[in-house]
Amino acid sequence: MKTLFLVRHAKSVNHFTAATDFNRALNERGIKDAREMAKRLVKKDILIDRFVSSPALRARMTAEIFINQYNRKPEEIQFIPDLYHASPEIFDQVVSRLDDQFSHVAIFAHNPGITDYAIYLAGSRISHMPTCSVFAAAASISSWKDFPSVKKDFIFFETPGDGNS
């Protein structure tokens, strides 16, 4: 069994105040939301054994907040440049290349691609991934290379505004 978590980066500073889109940091609300969502997953005993992220600053910061809540080291985050503004096809390629030693992988990335990929995986169960939302799906496989082509089971979808913490 392989479980994939899609995490849209938390709320970031306005793009007009950042030097470049790639270097936009999280704002105060984003930091708070990322901590809340990560704590919520830890509290629910949701296992993540691999953290994968776009290298853009806002995704990186979100991943670092999550990995910290899991008492893991930021150096363990795998950065994949292709995840910066990735299409669903790129997400499929990234997922199919994940290391099979990991069964519970969280990918931190951006809209519109992350929402498009979640919709592709879940159908009509979701229509939009707000900032710092978490989507989870699983497949009965032993290798990530098979994930794109098999049936996925919807596990959950949560947003910071759900108030489940």
Image (tube, grey):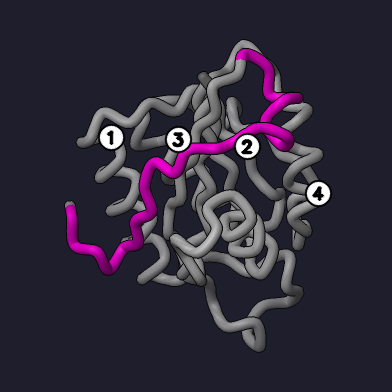
- Asked whether 7 falls inside the magenta stretch, the response is no
Q: Which residue is mark 3?
A: 67
Magenta residue span: 142-164
The correct choice, above or below, for 26 with respect to 108 in the image is below
Visible in this render: residue 50?
yes
Q: Contact, CB < 8 Å: mark 1 with mark 4?
A: no
- Residue that numbered label 1 is attached to: 42
Q: Earlier in the sequence, mark 1 or mark 2?
A: 1
SS label for mark 2: strand
Which residue is drawn at the image coordinates 59% and 43% (left, top)?
A: 107
The residue located at (49%, 40%) in the rendering is 137
Pointer 4 local density, CA inside 10 Å: few below 14, some 14–19, many at least 20? some
For residue 99, which quarter of the picture?
top right
In this picture, is 150 found above or below 114? Answer: above
Please report whichever mark, 2 or 3, sits nearer to the chain's N-terminal start: 2
Badge 3 element: helix
Q: Position of residue 121 (x, y in %)?
A: 59, 49
The answer to whether residue 57 of the structure is visible from this angle is no
